[in-house]
Amino acid sequence: MRTKQQVVSEFRRTAIVDAARIVFARRGFAAGIMDEVAKEAGIAKGTIYLYFRSKDEVYKAVMDGDMKALNRNTVQKLDAAPSLHGKVRAFILARLENAEARKDFFRIMDSGQGSLAYTRKQYRDWLREPVQRLASAMDEAAQRGEIRRLPAEPTAWLIADMTRGVIQRRLISPASDPAETEADRLMDFIWPSLTAGK
Amino acid sequence: MRTKQQVVSEFRRTAIVDAARIVFARRGFAAGIMDEVAKEAGIAKGTIYLYFRSKDEVYKAVMDGDMKALNRNTVQKLDAAPSLHGKVRAFILARLENAEARKDFFRIMDSGQGSLAYTRKQYRDWLREPVQRLASAMDEAAQRGEIRRLPAEPTAWLIADMTRGVIQRRLISPASDPAETEADRLMDFIWPSLTAGK
DNA sequence: TATTATACTGACTGTATGGTCAGTGGTCCA
DNA sequence: TGGACCACTGACCATACAGTCAGTATAATA
């Protein structure tokens, strides 16, 4: 049973992280000032420092939370799809839609601002789980003869890289097509490559 | 005939831009302080402001110069290749090798720091020429029946996005394979997709 | 209701740094 | 040789902002 205290405390933490996400997305990490985060959260700046050690900690909290949610979401949709084709598409679509729904977060994460070293070091770890799921699915499909034999893990990373590249372009020049269309276009490109010679 | 004055002036500008590239790459834009740029260039800080209006201007000079050089290089190699396969590979390899050779610049450009808005707005324009060359080459090859018919420009952008994604990964986790190998791996993935059904 | 404990506030501090400008020294011409 | 010119210098200024902490409001307890 959580005490009233704990509930309030968690509420504040969440409010701060939410506010920080908005401010960092709007201005970037360096120009996203703590006074503004406080204002956005409707509290005094000092209060933030009751919950977080530093600006950097707040940044990490934003990144960690969103990244975990995104990866959970990706893995879930990937697992739910029956075929390999569906799984690859699910992976791509989950990333694209998330980028759409949470432009804020993706702008931060994309721009790699803030504790750069931290972001860099974490990036591969964050992505590892969904990518490895994808790789396993590809391995199994290859054994069933559905796709050609290819190095599953590098290829899965390649697909992740492609998706990321497309997301970045869509953030830069306002997305022209809906995520579904973009996912289909990507699949049109990827699938022949996986099945060539089959 | 350039006057002695002009020569010295150009020399200084270059020295400043070179120093700025190093410092910004080392620390990022925000933390790359002008005192350090001056020190790196072996001049006083005030001198920088004789040649550039602001820190932002210096940043733009770094980006513009490097971007133009990179694109010139890409187009040149692309044009030199005889076949479409060669052209696509040349495009990828040029980007990869440049990223390798000028990690500094790519770290800045990748991290999108500095005048963010500027970088974002320019990015598509910068890439447009090489990408459109690639698209034309693909169109021609499609007409010759070498590859399947597909929307050339979106596909060319996709290849550019893929390449960028791979470059980013190689910057994050120290590149394990030489650029040539990576280019081949990418081609193994891309080419079947372009020729599927042929 | 009085007392203690706890959460919160926001004015303030210290520092970092972009940009300035009065002064210096070297160069060139008369 | 003198002096006008100007590229260059670096101490200095103004500002912005992360983080602090003495003080206040609110809630819990007796």
Image (tube, coloured by chain):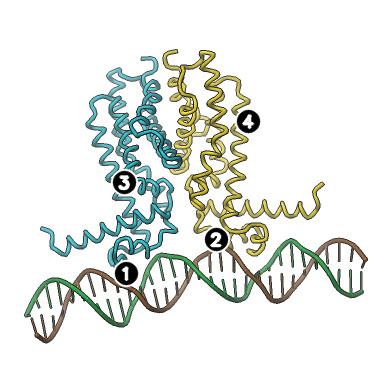
Chain colours: A cyan, B yellow, C brown, D green
Q: Which residue has dot 1 on it?
A: A46
**Observer able to see residue A49:** yes
Q: Residue A127: where, in percent of width, then height? A: 34, 40
At mark 4, the secondary structure is helix
| Dots 1 and 4 on the same chain | no
> Badge 1 local density, few (<14 within 10 Å), some, or many (20+)?
few
Q: Nearer the viewer, residue A148 or D1?
A: D1
Q: Which residue has dot 4 on it?
A: B76
Q: Nearer the viewer, residue A186 or B182?
A: A186
Which residue type carries mark 3?
A: Met
Q: Which residue has dot 2 on it?
A: B33
Residue drawn where x is 47% and y is 48% of the image:
B111
Label 4 resides on the chain identified as B
At mark 2, the secondary structure is loop
Q: Which residue has dot 3 on it?
A: A67
**Observer able to see residue B185:** no
In the picture, residue A187 is in which quadrant?
Answer: top left
| Dots 2 and 3 on the same chain | no
Marks 3 and 1, how far apart in space? Answer: 27 Å
Marks 1 and 4, how far apart in space? Answer: 57 Å
Which residue type carries mark 2?
A: Ile
- Determine contact: label 2, label 3, CB under 8 Å: no
Q: Residue B191: where, in percent of width, then height? A: 46, 22
Residue drawn where x is 50% and y is 57% of the image:
B30
- Determine contact: label 4, label 2, CB under 8 Å: no
Relative side of A88 to B164, left or right = left
Q: Residue A198: where, in percent of width, then height? A: 35, 15
- Determine contact: label 1, label 4, CB under 8 Å: no
| Dots 4 and 2 on the same chain | yes
Marks 4 and 3, how far apart in space? Answer: 40 Å
Location of the C terminus of chain B (image quadrant): top left
Label 1 resides on the chain identified as A
